[in-house]
Image: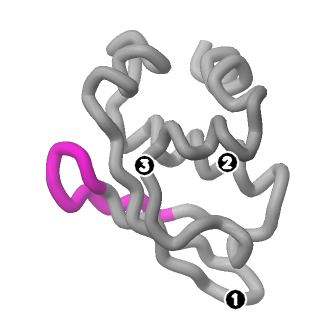
Amino acid sequence: MITVKKIDDRTFEVTVAGQTATTHRVTVDRAYHEKLAGGHISAKELVEKSFEFLLKRESNTSILRAFELPVIGRYFPEYETTIRKMLK
């Protein structure tokens, strides 16, 4: 289960329940949010969908504890293409 809590306009705290619960701090730049979501969903929803993407590829304990959303693409080059498809 993924829980996303808005800290401020750019920062979110994500808790992932699993065998071991983890907490992550994610920063979303406004321009990057617009690039991926085109204004169709909130930044909070984008973060949640991004964690769904990540959890299909690695365990919650392997996900960085703090990162900016574009970092996902460094580890998973298909991220931007896949997340856009997920949002349609």
Q: Earlier in the sequence, mark 2 or mark 1?
A: 1
Q: Is residue 37 left or right of residue 75?
A: left
Q: Is residue 53 above or below residue 30?
A: below
Quarter of the figure with residue 62 = bottom right
Query: x%, y% of residue 13?
Result: 36, 65
Quarter of the figure with residue 2 = bottom right
Q: Nearer the viewer, residue 66 or 60?
A: 66
**Marks 1,3: beta carbons within 8 A:** no
Magenta residue span: 3-11
Q: Which residue corresponds to mark 3?
A: 68
Q: Nearer the viewer, mark 2 or mark 3?
A: 3
Mark 3 nearby-residue class (10 Å; few <14, some 14–19, many ≥20)? some
Q: Earlier in the sequence, mark 1 or mark 3?
A: 1
The image quadrant where one finds the C terminus is top right
What secondary structure is marked by label 3? strand
Q: Which residue corresponds to mark 2?
A: 52
- Residue drawn where x is 75% and y is 39% of the image: 76
Work out which residue is located at the far front of the displayed protein and give it: 74
What secondary structure is marked by label 2? helix
Work out which residue is located at the far left of the displayed protein and give it: 8
Q: Which residue corresponds to mark 1?
A: 20
Disc 2 from disc 3: Cα separation: 16 Å
Q: Is residue 3 left or right of residue 78?
A: left
What secondary structure is marked by label 1? loop
Q: Earlier in the sequence, mark 2 or mark 3?
A: 2
- Residue drawn where x is 46% and y is 36% of the image: 46
